[in-house]
Amino acid sequence: MKTIDLHGSTIHDAWKRFTAFAYENSLDKEKYIRVITGHGALQKEFPNWCDACVHVRKYETEPYNKGSWKVRLR
């Protein structure tokens, strides 16, 4: 599973990086990606990004790390 770490990014920059990463991986026919947001503002915003992204089918926090998300692509 390919992973992107958004730690240290501004909210706007992280959103742009996430949507580009989801798009690129959906083109590559990847089924899942991992997105690391950490436990701050990015973690709170991330569900909204997934809901708005046409490439995301579903998402959930990973059980062992609530600052990491498993994302199912379309």
Image: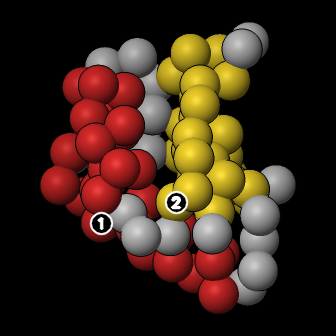
Q: Residues within 10 Å of mark 1 (few under 14, many from 20)?
A: few
Eyeballing the image, is 50 above or below 7? below
Give the CA distance from mark 1 to mark 2: 14 Å
Q: Nearer the viewer, residue 7 or 37?
A: 37
Residue 74 shows up from this direction: yes
Q: On residue 16, which mark appears?
A: 1
Q: Position of residue 10 (x, y in %)?
A: 21, 45
Q: Point out the residue furthest to the bottom here.
A: 27
Viewer-nearest of discs 1 and 2: 2
Residue 12: name its quadrant.
bottom left
Q: Nearer the viewer, residue 19 or 11?
A: 19
Q: Position of residue 73 (x, y in %)?
A: 63, 63
Amino acid on which the number 1 mark rests in the picture: Lys
Instruction: Identify the residue under disc 2.
Output: 56
Eyeballing the image, is 64 above or below 37? above
Residue 31: name its quadrant.
bottom right
Disc nearer the start of the sequence (1/2): 1
Q: Is residue 58 left or right of residue 12?
A: right
- Residue at (35%, 38%) from the top-left corner? 46
User: SS at mark 2?
Assistant: strand
Amino acid on which the number 2 mark rests in the picture: Val
